[in-house]
Image (cartoon, grey):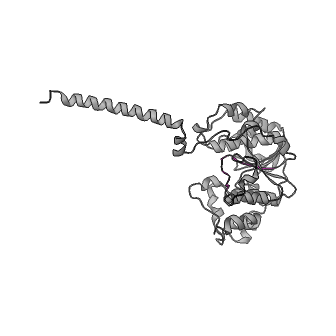
Amino acid sequence: MFEEGFPLKAMKRLQKGFLAALVLVVVIIYFLHRTSLYCYLRTCYTKENFPSDFDYSSLMKAPGIMFVETTETMEPSALAVCSVESAARRNPDKHVYYFMKGFNGNLSHYSHSRYEAIRVLSSLKKVIIAPLRPKTLFQNTPLSAWYQQVNPDWEVYWIHVLSDACRIALLWKYGGIYLDTDIISLKPLDFRNFLCAEGYMTANGAALGFEEHHDFIWECMEEYVTNYKGGTWGHQGPGLMSRVLKRWCPSNNLGQFFDMECKGISYLSPKYFYPISYTNWESYFERWEKSDIEYFFSETNGAHVWNFKNVAQRKQVIAGSGTLMEHFFLTYCPTTYRVLVKRVS
């Protein structure tokens, strides 16, 4: 016979068993977070996969146009390749640098057919593919201490905040023009010491141009570290540029400075790089009349296509679609179109 009170004892044993299982699950999750299996289950990032003692000074012999890839990929998208190609074609007098975190520094290692995009880039005149070594790049800047302390695995937007940091460090040390890899250049870029408005009250850092060791960029690096909030989207990017510019001018009404200089810095209105706002990004994948394109983008130097909004939908440039994006590819990056778009289609 079962003794009286057996159900109560059984319930207590079940509760203890549940708690033990819960503790075990927590321990396993903690262990997985420290192992490669955890990285298999979700995306993990590393700070450095290659030696960090790269000599940037020997590479950056003259200021040029700079792009940054902060993932480990060596197979950049057709859009990224188009951005680099269009910048090189519109600015034949400038070197174009494509800094890639996954690049080991030796192009001969990427001659296989799977690296079609790299072969396109390396075939373009004045395009230089270079290693991105953040530890070296951040040396002797306020960003160095931040980079030593930050843990990429706990960062929600790591590749983005790292890109935000790399661009201002490159501009500080070497000067030139920085562009995001989703900006297609439509006209030559002859600006100096500029940033561009995304909207009436917000600046953006997707297109920047500064002389080396400019005080504004140093202030950006200090602000980046002092008020770092990596878990807030845009805080280290557009938010950073807006905060520093408001102090630089000084004014909370940035719109009043459109297409004017503020203490030696040109503040361009959105038409130059953001003629279509991020809320209407899908317009780039719609059909346009040629006359409308020529009129709408008549004052645009580079079209930012807001690729971060396209992560979920993954819209592609399709040969024969007649979309605005196809027109841009055909006109401004024909090699990319021929090799990475038309051949695939």
Where is residue 322? Give x, y as percent. Answer: 66, 71
- Quadrant housing residue 214: top right
Which residue corresponds to the image point at 72% horizontal and 51% vertical from the top-left?
A: 180
**Is any part of residue 118 visible from this angle?**
yes
Q: How many marks?
A: 0
- 71 in magenta: yes
Where is residue 305? Give x, y as percent. Answer: 68, 57
Highlighted range, magenta: 65-76
Which of the pair 295/144 is nearer the observer? 144
- Quadrant housing residue 147: top right
- 272 in magenta: no
122 to 150, vertically: above or below: below
Which of the pair 25/310 is nearer the observer? 25
Where is residue 260? Give x, y as percent. Answer: 82, 48
Which residue corresponds to the image point at 66% horizontal and 59% vertical from the top-left?
A: 114
Residue furthest to the left in view is 1
Which residue corresponds to the image point at 75% horizontal and 53% vertical from the top-left?
A: 108
Horizontal arrangement in the rendering, residue 23 relative to residue 79 (left or right) = left
